Image (cartoon, helix red, strand yellow):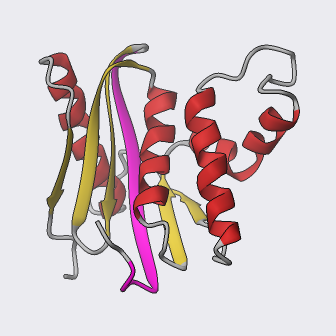
Amino acid sequence: MTTAPYQSMTVGTDGACSGNPGYAGWAWAAADGTWASGAVARSTNQATELQGLLEAITTFADVPELTVELDSAYAMNTYASWMDNHKRRGWHTGDGKPTSNREIIEALVDARDARRAAGLPPVRLVKVKGHARPGTHPLNEQADKQAVAARVRAAAGTITTETGTWAPPGR
């Protein structure tokens, strides 16, 4: 997917898990009406939240003004402040335990650093309330819908990544 024509984009992300760990899915939904999701045979909710964020950032890597709406404080804090500390400590937490979700976090560091190297501004993260009143956060709601569908695919043994389109409000 090429995103070069966009000067700005807002994307909602989410993850879904049945059991923790268990069958899982991640997704993003963009204001341009596109979405993507992935089914994961066994993962955690936190890992899928991070994966949704990573997939959104890498898909829209060349968009200068990228805003990501997410309902996960864990994913937001990991990207905004924790990931550099994990790296600096040799991929360990403050209390010496190995960093959970290291592979995804390393990929997030790489995505962030690639934006910096390209001279792009930082990704703007916006925390939204998940499962709020319908229509409150349509991008997050669509991402949730697609993440749940991916989780269902995973439970059925269909480990796929899918893309599609939807009609965001106001389009």
Rendered location of residue 108, percent (x, y)? 60, 47
Stretch in magenta:
4-19
Q: Quadrant of residue 169?
A: bottom left
Residue placed most toward the observer, 96 or 3: 3
Dividing the image into 4 quarters, which one contains the N terminus?
Answer: bottom left
Say left or right for 121 vs 164: right
**Residue occupying the point 30% across, 62% down:** 138
**17 drawn magenta:** yes
Residue for point 63% across, 62% down: 114
Total tally of numbered discs in the picture: 0
Kindly report the secondary structure that dominates the magenta region of the rendered protein.
strand
Q: Quadrant of the C terminus?
A: bottom left
Relative image position of residue 30 (x, y in whole percent):
32, 66
On screen, residue 144 versus residue 11, left or right, reads left
What residue sits 42% from the left and 45% below the top? 52
Asked if the stretch drawn in magenta spans residue 152, the answer is: no
Q: Identify which residue is drawn at 15% across, 63% down.
A: 165
